[in-house]
Image (cartoon, coloured by chain):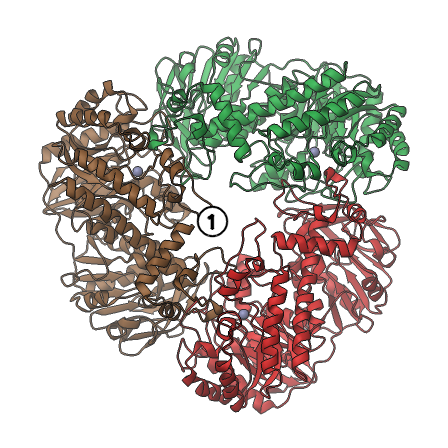
Chain colours: A red, B brown, C green
């Protein structure tokens, strides 16, 4: 199904009905509204002006649209900021982040919780049972613009409280953090300082806890909003629209509050954000890299426990990347179908009409700036609308045979203590995902501790801290399990495990890590054996205590080991080693593969198979394929669907 | 004529007479003094010590020198800063910029205006009618060291006042800026916040207005100084010495206050400042790029409505660039002649004698550090002095046949909203200028709204906002008019025009822009037709509604269009496309060209023709040329002058 | 002899005796303790808990270890910072540097001096005569983490006092600094502002004095600690552990307080810190560059007036560089022997056991994290222990035949006023040292004014300000003296000398510098004559008034001159010119050389000759060598010792 993000407050009321009618005409069934409208519904304290929104909802509902209503907490109005400056967030350097854009609040502020609860209650109470409202969105893009972490006095106080709850006594805190080092000992929880603006780096354990604390706060804050909404709006679902490549907080924990997940898909903008090489960036500038969107679809399907939307789908060029190319013709349609292939229930375009004003005026919409004229993206959306109507209801997504265990906390750990400047958690996970996808495999993301029993192959690019639930799930996996570097290298308090890495995984892997080398660009350590290639960036020195050695570094040290169904890789693999290792694991797991060129991707949804061409050359579908949509020769930027 | 910048306060009084005599000996007729001497004429509040300056002026005057006196407002003394810290400027990050160098004031401070008026009044009253004083310089290098914009509370208040004047009601402000977006609505002008230090980018309309506001302030502040001077110093002219490549404020508006413009020419330092490629920087390191100085001469000739000086001419290596090479032998002479060729009335060297102390001690003078010994630059200046004496009075500069419309506000617009990281307004204008100059053409700069009727060719590299005067002047042009990208893409309030770009220019161009793509390095879009090459950086998708298409992009979209005398280019052109397009326009305009190698430049002043060799190889003058100065074979770093 | 850094406070008391025994087993005789333990010996004001340290010292002493006790002033505890926030240092941008790591104090704080004296007195009084204590270390790594300079109000006040002492009257200050420039004149010492956060650059003389002031403070602060210790601890020596490549303060002046110098040798981490090319960094990533450690050994031998230790020797990978590779097998042993070859009395490893917690948990120790298991470094240390036992006492280091005059103040001068962005003082000195060492020569560092009479060759890479003592020592040198660029270019007040550079050296060199050109990468000026190559980065224009010209630039200007025994080089030399010039000087000095490949280094200690192989290929010792340790074919990462 298709949706769209709409801002009735941006357009004269006289245009709403026509807008709604034209949405329906191209097959749009859902419309999201309201998430930035606080100043229009409460222009000053306790003076509410809901009437325009009442009318807007009525107009949209009357046109047959299903409405998703957003809580407006991403944009506290000026009068509120002036009244309570303690809601403002702070940069790590101590500078306040002021009014004038969005997300100018810290989750640590008690004032902010009270004010959030107040406005959410107001909105939920007014619209909770409106027949046009089918679901809710909490806030907007938690963590976007680096807003997970905040570094002010409110944050310090909330952190101290969090620490008191987690450590009970300051002695336990001192012990856990090892504050005996450099005389950093604290006499009370009031002594806790922000882990920033120190002479040299602060204690990594403190910094890691600071991250966990902020992550917990977001989940709690979101739950607060959800509980208010549920009280007032029975029978409606709740989602949040996550932002891609934001890993500052644990999305799974927020997902636990929600009925379904959703995310905001800007595939082209992400090409400049992800650490691709310059050559890759240039190559994929006008289509995006073929795994960017898919990676997130699979992640958010997990966050939503099987249910997800694309809440904002890029409909043309955007405004916020260093360069913002026009997508190649066909890409808006391709991305839409790809999201559906990965199981999206609704793909909702951002936005209905390009704004002729303010920060996003260079962001395309389905209509040209300020006008009622379709943009290229609008026409492609309409095409998908027609195609969807032709194909009818899509089958449910099934479970994949491969699981990728994705651990947000490992991002924090490796950011807090990179040890090698290019150890980037997101890049590691993405490259493992990419290599699997190039083998034609579908992948499910699984959170640490999630059930792994039925997967044929489980890959763990890394999991720095392995808690008991995660360990038990991994131990319970019946398929092949492959661990990447750094796994099990820290305990919950960010200490090195007494038995050394991989800590609690040692019984599974049969290995022990005694040294770690981080390698600058240009350095690598060749690997040969059942797989070959090289280790780069991160290289572990491993005792192979109770395992077979499948491949070795140049000096004979173990590089890839196996103990029963568990394989472990002792380095960050270069492309050859990564591909070879995953092939070996896939073979060990007895999985069929269908290797594809690097510009083609496949995906199954129920009994439907989809193929997507991100490249510049055609590719022929498998002989057996009989396309329901598209042709056997899949030309660039085209989509094919067949049953199989 | 030649001049020099002199600091009598830096040298023992016993040396002044000899200095003045030696100035005259090498042909210097003008001397600028006083512009940094506040602490010497008012060492503490209301305690004036003008006597030394009286004597210095008398000595210089007695030697036959004509004196330009500077107001000392670029260097408020310590006691003043301590008394009124509210005069200090602020960085965008909120940090105050303190005492200890120069330009430590914000134009927004009412205190500063009062104190400026007070000191200017004192100086003007004392020296306004001294027979040695022929002219005045206001302040020094407005905007240098990023001092146009300031970001403190004084600035916020002055900005709010400016907005009140421009928008009358806060409702109109909200409407103009589109503050409904992200709940940014203001309830009163007091609510206006600085458009900085926000979580993500602030409203571009606010930022654009903030820039306009600061630009207006400088013009007003300068006018305040001019009015005081005019009251006390009848019959003397007033100038300001602008700094090259400072586009933060509208120099034309300041020029309106002045009798003539002047600028400070540091051709070598600018090689490191302008976004040249590294290869270009290395190539031109010791001569400067052959268009750097000329570009500014032509700009300031326009700012001065035909009259300009070089107030500070680089006489050797300077101190402020990342690297500061010694100019090749002959360059100081070449630059001097080149300035005269472009119409400069006086070329004034900075400075008489290298200082052996303080910030500029590595900056060459006409004399070695602290001594009475000529530097290389001093000897070259003397040579020009002799040559000028030989040639006699130079004829007046005429009007060129090509106009380049230069719009400061487009710099602000594209800085506020680059959309593509390498869309640099100054680079665009400079490259268009360079391409014209390589065809041997002279160019006049014209401000938006300036009369264009008599030019055979008018180029507009870009003009983001086209006001009615500018539109009328462009519509009234009888020659060929060529528009570059982004023209007419915003209205005065920074909104997208309802009819889309090029807005009010649509009737002229017959085109409409529906999409914009910004292209990272490595991406380009090939163009072919009557011209060929490629679009880079910025590429527009154009409806050719009422125009001929002269060249097309690879997919068939219009790249270059023509409607009557108006051509429009839908991209940032690469070098081939730029050269081809300008050639086509020049041909259409029926202009004769004399293409020169990239290291040679020509220029006409009245009936005199000049040639300059910036390169490493000789070049032969046209057959017909019969040099008054120099030889027919123009060797590197040489100048030739002939009548023609 | 070998030592180790140990933190009894990090480990359960029950482990101390075994740790001590195992130290002794591998030949460790010395142990450093206590330097970060303030919060454990004074957990809150005036509540002292020395008992644990009493016991630790007794246990170590009982095992036969000699103890070096550190004063704990590098880590002021939280309660002290809270009580007296005025001890905190400030960034140049004005931001306070808070509690949470180490070195969070400014030397300018009077409070801090009082508190330091108090704790040093307490510790020295308690342990001064303990039979286990053989020496003391003051504080830890002065200046590390950019902590020499601090930019707060305490610093401003202390700077003003320092200026008052040095200049007596504000008139003399104004004259010295040339504050008449830009109206920067001060009316009193209270007017002195921090030379930072100005609109454009502050006065270089002020900034240079600010650096001198901070350098002086460190020497004074250290002397204060030494005097307290000496009072309480007769017969024990005092050292400080300097950090490599920290030149912010004059180490020679601190050395004057000490009985011997020591330094902390992290050869691999420094590869990323020193401005090597990327190719060099990759090449030497796992061994370090072969001159990094040696350069510092020779420097600190001078700082210690012949006596030095390595107080902290890298024992494996560290944690603080952008990348932290594992050293190649053998390098820990090689570095140890190399330090001994250069005259180190003791090489002390940092640290005994890898910490499983806090900031340095990725820093290797002689034992694995938290355990009693030897690391690779531990095993290599044990090997050295055995070898030392076999070889017996090493002979004393003699004097070298080559002196390199190393002037900390020139670092400050060239940082304050680089003029060319890549004029890096440390790089200049290092490259001259490297070129000498590749000729097989031993080098002594000598401070300005140090006795040069007996050296056959004296090289002065640069000495910006030449005071009378330095001039006299240079004039008194009987060997060949070679000056590099910028020598004698500023007087004590940072003014250009009246006679121009090289100022007081003019009678020695017979040259005068009239212009300076700084050259961006890609620019160079070819040199030919008795030497050839090119000048890069910095090129002087020289009058050869009273000297022979040995080589000239392309245009005929003097590049290398000679007057009697004094040679002067008028540029930053490229590798060819540097090597050629040093060869010429070496020949003129009549020195024998033994050129070695760029991966081999030699060193004499008494009658022992040492060779070290940093490369990947073998090298054969001279025919005459008969190794006491190692083999004639010196394989990679190996050491050879022979008598000769
Ligand atoms: Zn969004
Ligand atoms: Zn100037
Ligand atoms: Zn250390």
In screen coordinates, is B246 left or right of A481? left
Q: Judge from the rendering whether residue A108 lies leftward or rightward of residue B257; answer left or right.
A: right
Q: Is residue B431 left or right of residue A296?
A: left
**Where's ligand 3: which quadrant?**
top right
Mark 1: few/some/many CA within 10 Å (<14, 14-19, 20+): some
Ligand 1 has an atom within 8 Å of the beta carbon of the residue at disc 1: no
> In the orientation shown, which residue stands out farthest toward the front?
A46
Give residue C474's position: percent from left, percent from top: 50, 12
* Chain identifier of the residue bearing label 1 in the image: B
Quadrant hosting residue A390 = bottom right
Residue B543 lies, in percent from the top left, at 34, 77
Pick the front one: C501 or A638:
C501
Task: Give the residue at mark 1.
Answer: B94
Q: Is residue C406 left or right of residue A378?
A: right
The structure residue drawn at horizontal position 64% and vertical position 26%, both measured from the top left corner, is: C296
Tell me where residue B49 appears, x and y as whole percent: 26, 27
The residue that appears at 84% across and 56% down in the rendered structure is A504
**In this orientation, which residue lies closer to the viewer: C278 or B422?**
B422
Q: Is any part of residue A343 visible from this angle?
A: no
Instruction: State the quadrant of the N terminus of chain C.
Output: top right
Q: Quadrant of the C terminus of chain C?
A: top right
Q: Is residue A257 above or below residue B27?
A: below
Q: Relative to B69, is C362 above or below?
A: below
Viewer-proximal residue among C321 and B117: B117
Residue C135 sits above or below residue A166 on the image: above
- On the image, the x and y values in percent for residue C537 come to 44, 33
Asked which secondary structure carries label 1, the reply is loop
């Amino acid at each position: 199904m298709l949706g769209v993000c709409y801002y009735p407050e941006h357009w004269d009321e006289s245009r709403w009905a026509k807008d709604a009618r034209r949405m329906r005409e191209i097959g749009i069934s859902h419309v999201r509204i309201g998430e930035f409208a606080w100043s229009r519904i409460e222009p000053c304290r306790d003076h509410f002006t809901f009437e325009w929104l009442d009318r807007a909802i009525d107009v949209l509902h009357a046109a047959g649209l299903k409405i998703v209503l957003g809580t407006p907490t991403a944009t506290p109005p000026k009068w509120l900021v002036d009244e309570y400056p303690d809601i403002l967030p702070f940069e790590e350097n101590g500078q306040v982040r002021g009014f004038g854009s969005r997300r100018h609040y810290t989750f640590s502020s008690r004032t902010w919780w009270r004010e959030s609860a107040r406005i959410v209650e107001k909105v939920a109470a007014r619209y909770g049972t409106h027949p046009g409202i089918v679901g809710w969105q909490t806030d907007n893009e938690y963590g976007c613009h680096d807003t997970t972490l905040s570094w002010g006095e409110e944050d310090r106080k909330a952190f101290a409280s969090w620490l008191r709850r987690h450590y009970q006594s300051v002695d336990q805190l001192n012990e856990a953090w090892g504050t005996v080092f450099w005389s950093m000992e604290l006499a009370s929880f009031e002594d806790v300082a922000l882990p920033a603006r120190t002479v040299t780096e602060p204690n990594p354990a403190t910094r890691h806890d600071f991250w966990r604390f902020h992550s917990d706060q977001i989940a709690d804050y979101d739950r607060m909003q959800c509980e208010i909404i549920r009280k007032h709006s029975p029978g409606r679902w709740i989602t949040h629209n996550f932002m891609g490549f934001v890993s500052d907080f644990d999305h799974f924990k927020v997902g636990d509050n929600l009925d379904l997940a959703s995310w905001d898909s800007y595939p082209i903008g992400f090409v400049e954000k992800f650490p691709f090489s310059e050559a890759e960036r240039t190559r994929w500038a006008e289509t995006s890299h073929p795994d960017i969107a898919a990676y997130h679809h699979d992640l958010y399907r997990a966050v939503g426990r099987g249910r997800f939307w694309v809440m904002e789908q890029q409909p043309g060029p955007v405004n916020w990347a260093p360069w913002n190319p026009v997508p190649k013709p066909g890409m808006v349609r391709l991305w839409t179908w790809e999201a559906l292939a990965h199981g999206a229930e609704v793909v909702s375009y951002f936005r209905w009409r390009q704004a002729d004003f303010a920060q996003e005026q260079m962001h395309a919409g389905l209509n040209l700036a300020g006008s009622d004229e379709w943009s290229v993206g609008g026409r492609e959306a309409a095409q998908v609308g027609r195609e969807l109507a032709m194909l009818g209801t899509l089958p449910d997504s099934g479970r994949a045979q491969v699981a990728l265990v994705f651990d947000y906390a490992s991002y924090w750990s490796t950011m807090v203590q990179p040890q090698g400047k290019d150890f980037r958690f997101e890049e590691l996970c993405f490259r493992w995902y990419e290599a699997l996808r190039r083998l034609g495999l579908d992948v499910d993301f699984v959170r640490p501790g999630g059930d792994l029993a039925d997967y044929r192959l489980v890959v763990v690019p890394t999991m720095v801290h392995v808690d008991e639930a995660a360990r038990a799930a991994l131990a319970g996996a019946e398929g092949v399990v492959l661990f990447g570097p750094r796994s099990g290298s820290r305990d919950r308090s960010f200490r090195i495990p007494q038995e050394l890495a991989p800590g609690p995984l040692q019984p599974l892997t049969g290995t022990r890590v005694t040294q770690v080398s981080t390698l600058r660009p240009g350095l690598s350590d060749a690997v040969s054996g059942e797989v070959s290639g090289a280790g780069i960036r991160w290289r572990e020195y491993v005792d192979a205590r109770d395992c077979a050695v499948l491949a070795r570094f140049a000096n004979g040290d173990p590089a890839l080991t196996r103990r029963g169904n568990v394989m472990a890789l002792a380095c960050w693999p270069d492309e050859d080693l990564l591909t070879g290792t995953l092939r070996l694991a896939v073979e060990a797991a007895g999985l069929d593969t269908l290797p594809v060129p690097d510009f083609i991707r496949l995906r199954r949804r129920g009994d439907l198979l989809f193929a997507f061409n991100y490249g510049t050359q055609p590719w022929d579908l498998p002989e057996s394929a009989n396309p329901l949509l598209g042709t056997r020769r899949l030309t660039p930027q085209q989509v094919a669907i067949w049953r199989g």
